[in-house]
């Protein structure tokens, strides 16, 4: 059984740490979602910490999966916007290149740009 943090969000559970998942690059989306949830609950420092960790994990991804990178960047952008950083949000969204995913022919990506 894993222990949750007081707010019920814990990507760094003892089980995750024991299995080495907390530092696995493909857990970036988990940290990005955790950051978004913490931002919604106004836990600013924890949200920033998880967002930074998600970005660090994304930088360590060796086998790039375009849809995963885009999804993670979009969630991080939502977090950044929730934390009041409009410039950072725009930068993250600019990096989320849906055309790169389509060109690489990896899965299906549908974005409503309206």
Image (tube, rainbow, N blue to C red):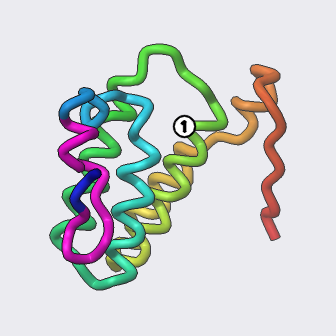
Q: Residues within 10 Å of mark 1 (few under 14, many from 20)?
A: many
Q: How many marks?
A: 1
Q: Position of residue 102 (x, y in %)?
A: 80, 31
Residue in the image at 33% along x and 43% along y: 55
Residue in the image at 34% along x and 79% along y: 84
Residue in the image at 50% along x and 58% along y: 75
> Where is mark 1, residue-wise?
69
Residue in the image at 42% along x and 49% along y: 30
Where is the C terminus found, in terms of image quarters?
A: bottom right
Identify the element where label 1 is drawn: helix
Q: Position of residue 46 (x, y in %)?
A: 20, 67
The quarter of the displayed image where residue 96 is located? top right
The quarter of the displayed image where residue 54 is located? top left
> Which residue range is magenta in the image?
4-17
Magenta stretch mostly in which secondary structure?
Answer: loop
Residue lying furthest top: 63
Q: Is residue 49 left or right of residue 64?
A: left
Q: Position of residue 2 (x, y in %)?
A: 26, 53
Q: Is residue 83 magenta?
A: no
Q: Position of residue 99 (x, y in %)?
A: 75, 36
Q: Nearer the viewer, residue 57 or 8?
A: 8
Q: Nearer the viewer, residue 56 or 98?
A: 56
Q: Nearer the viewer, residue 88 or 60?
A: 60
Q: Is residue 29 left or right of residue 108?
A: left
Work out whether 71 lies above or below 103. Answer: below
The quarter of the displayed image where residue 80 is located? bottom left
């Amino acid at each position: 059984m894993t222990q949750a943090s007081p707010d019920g969000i814990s990507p760094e559970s003892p089980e995750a740490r024991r299995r080495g998942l907390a530092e696995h690059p493909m857990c970036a989306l988990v940290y990005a979602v955790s950051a978004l949830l913490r931002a919604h609950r106004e836990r600013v420092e924890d949200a920033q910490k998880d967002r930074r960790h998600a970005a660090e994990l994304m930088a360590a991804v060796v086998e790039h999966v375009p849809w995963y990178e885009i999804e993670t960047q979009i969630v991080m952008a939502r977090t950044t916007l929730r934390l009041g950083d409009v410039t950072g949000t725009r930068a993250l969204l600019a990096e989320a290149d849906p055309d790169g995913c389509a060109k690489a022919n990896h899965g299906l990506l549908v974005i409503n740009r309206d």
